[in-house]
Amino acid sequence: MKITGLEVIAVEIPLTRTFGGSRYSVASRCTLITRIETDAGLVSEVYNGDNRDHLREVAAIVTDELGPLIMGEEVHAIERLWKKMFRAAEWNRDRKLVMEAIACVDSALWDLVGKAAGVNVCRLMGGFRQELPIISIGGYYEEGKSLADLGREMENLRERGMAGCKVKVGGLDAEGDAARVAAARDGAGSDFMIAVDANRGWPLAEAIRFARLVERYDIAWFEEPCHWHDDARMMAEVRRATSIPINAGQSEATAAGVRRLVAAEAVDIVNFDASEAGGITEWRRAAALCQLHDISMAHHEEPQIAMQMLAAVPLGLCVECFADPERDPIWDKLIANRPQPKDGVIAIPQGPGFGLELDWGLVERYRLG
């Protein structure tokens, strides 16, 4: 089965309100849809990523640089095609954008291989189980949002079928954010997973102080606690200072970056993002490394692909989404056949490949020219 055509479609949907993390704010949801055609008549249908600043640049790398490398090639030769595409990251440029572009193509190839085999990607990768716990990303900083509002948000997420929430922290001092976590736990109840994500927001001492303040609230993990410039060393220090598991990896562009975190004994959980770091093929390398070190796997956002991968491996922990449709109208509306979470669990789609059926009316409405 050979590749005969490639198209990438950039989509951007403005949000109805702004959502704030420790060092950033979000006002739109973006993605890239990659369609690869084959001489067997099979066509990929998968979307990846949320690069709000460089969406067109990533799309251009896919079509102008990677497309010519894979045209006419055999779909099943995924490792060989990955190696060919990776050469585009060798010269001096923004290599992160190249890895995002490779992720688009690589995910589309896995979709096609699954369609050719008649099974979902989860089964192709090992098929450990066919459902996963699902949590929401939430607890954002928003103007006028009170602690009571934060507690009610947790209640609403439970009603939407979530098993838990990853709450944003790192935008205040340790005491201020600890109060927000306490409010989230009060609203959630004792059997609802609460994780916290600082998005590299704090220096070492502040991160440790915060961790000690919130240990009493049964925190599932503390994600990216410390500033970027020395994150592995500082996370290792936080990990030694607290009983809360440390989660990181989403900021890494390659599996070698995950190896750096593991070697530093900085992580208990790795949330390496296939959509930002070379696709499923590179994610498998990181997952194998984590398996050897008994480190659990999560994934940064992108539940439409993450659930297939995480359910495939024994150490897959849970999948995360934006349950609030105002935060992620793409997850809410783009997938015409999306499974609905129930009692904190989401079933893995059983259609071949990623099993996605996209709403092309929505795509046409929000596609970028």
Image (cartoon, rainbow, N blue to C red):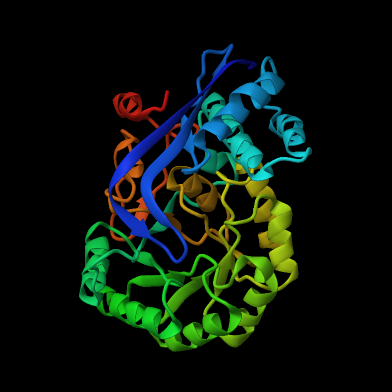
Q: Quadrant of the C terminus?
A: top left
Res. 229 image quadrant? bottom right
Q: Is residue 302 above or below residue 248?
A: above
The x and y percentages for residue 26 are 39, 52
Q: Residue, x 46% and y 43% (percent of image)?
A: 52
Q: Residue, x 27% and y 68% (percent of image)?
A: 154
Res. 163 image quadrant? bottom left
The x and y percentages for residue 271 are 56, 59
Q: Residue, x 78% and y 38% (percent of image)?
A: 91
- The answer to whether one can see residue 365 in this image is yes
The x and y percentages for residue 110 are 58, 33
Q: Is residue 152 above or below residue 53?
A: below
For the residue pair 165 and 202, the one nearer the viewer reads as: 202
For the residue pair 149 and 141, the one nearer the viewer reads as: 141
Circle count: 0
Q: Residue, x 42% and y 40% (percent of image)?
A: 30
Q: Is residue 136 left or right of residue 5?
A: left
The x and y percentages for residue 282 are 67, 45
